[in-house]
Image (cartoon, rainbow, N blue to C red):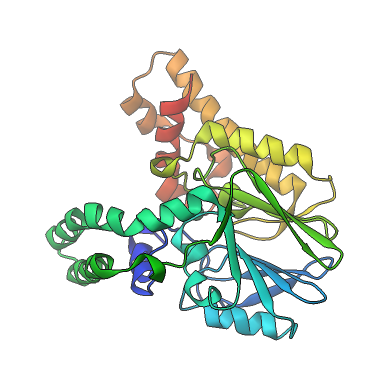
Amino acid sequence: MRNTALIVPLLLTGALGGAQEHHDRAPNDPFTLKPLSGDVYALYGRGGNVGFYVGPDAVVVVDSQFKDLAPGIVEKIKSVTDKPIKYLVNTHHHGDHVGGNEVFRHFAVIIAHDNVRTRMLASPAEILRDFPARVEAARKAGNEQQAKQLSEQLEAAKSVKIEEIGAPVLTFDSEVRIHVGDETVQVWHTPPAHTDGDAVIYFEKANVLHMGDDFFKKVIPFIDVAHGGSVKGYLVALDKVIAKVPASVTIIPGHGEVTDLAGLKAFRQYVADLLDAARKAKAAAMAKDDFLKQVDLPAYKGYSGYADRFKANAASAWDEAP
Ligand SMILES: [Zn+2]
């Protein structure tokens, strides 16, 4: 699935959360539950993976996907516990991770990095700035349906009130901990990687780590440089996280299957190989255009999204490589 086609339902469902989203899972079963250790669960869906912890008196949820899926997510959580959902942590501001906030905000405290709130509140203005050209482009391409949907979002952005945006109400700059029962939920801001508001969430006792979109498992990442993301930053962020967690950790990526530290390191290798290819081309005095025509990392061709996003990753790597 391509980003362009997916931006549309994001905002139509009312989630003025972010102008980007990206997902690679077919929407055949958006509520697949995977129990992990220590009362932590992964919930696979149409957008970014959800994680949640069931404590003795409260549930902590990580990410909320889309507004239209949020009631189903809540229902799925209710199928394993009758404890109240008290906290929702957002890993970053993209619509496929915060779209359901509009549902969760009525019963949960929404927590995220400072920049997530800033980005979400800035989203209507971004739509007003960027969407007229996109409506025009869609019309020119003969895609009337897309033009109509974009226009509707443009109209919605004109009248949306700040209090209608499901932005986090509790924000932090470096880290925060949520204490529920005997579990400590560590929320760490990472150096800019996917965006400049990324957080990863570590359920300490359960030894489960939710990486948000700092980690795409066997999926070519989207690196949102327009919102502070960075290829080099990914390496710094990943190394920091890898150094902090035990080797036996179970990891929920932002997109793709639940995995382990080896899976995370394989993704780190992709980012390292990408930067290395750009660095070598620059050292050989190759022009950017030629690099982008030639660049290919066959080892990662099997990853989902290679055809869609690899060249964009390579362009960002070129811009950042020494
Ligand atoms: Zn994202």
Q: Is residue 19 above or below residue 76?
A: above
Q: Position of residue 123 (x, y in %)?
A: 35, 57
Rendering coords of residue 83 (x, y %): 74, 81
Residue positioned 44% across, 13% down in the render: 284
Q: Is residue 67 left or right of residue 32?
A: left
Q: Residue at x 40, y 34 (%)?
A: 315
The reply to whether residue 275 is in sight is yes
- 291 and 46: which is toward the camera: 46
Nearest the camera: 254 or 81?
81
In percent of width and height, residue 252 lies at 68, 58
Q: Is 164 or 284 nearer to us in this picture?
A: 164
Q: Is residue 161 left or right of residue 29?
A: left
| Residue 138 sits in quarter | bottom left
Say above or below: 116 vs 233.
below
The total of numbered circles placed on residues is: 0
Residue 236 location (% of width, % of height): 62, 33
Q: Is residue 220 visible?
A: no
Residue 256 higher or lower than 191, as above or below: below
Where's the N terminus, which quadrant?
bottom left
Residue at point 74% right, 86% down? Answer: 82
Write the residue at 51% across / 66% down.
Answer: 47
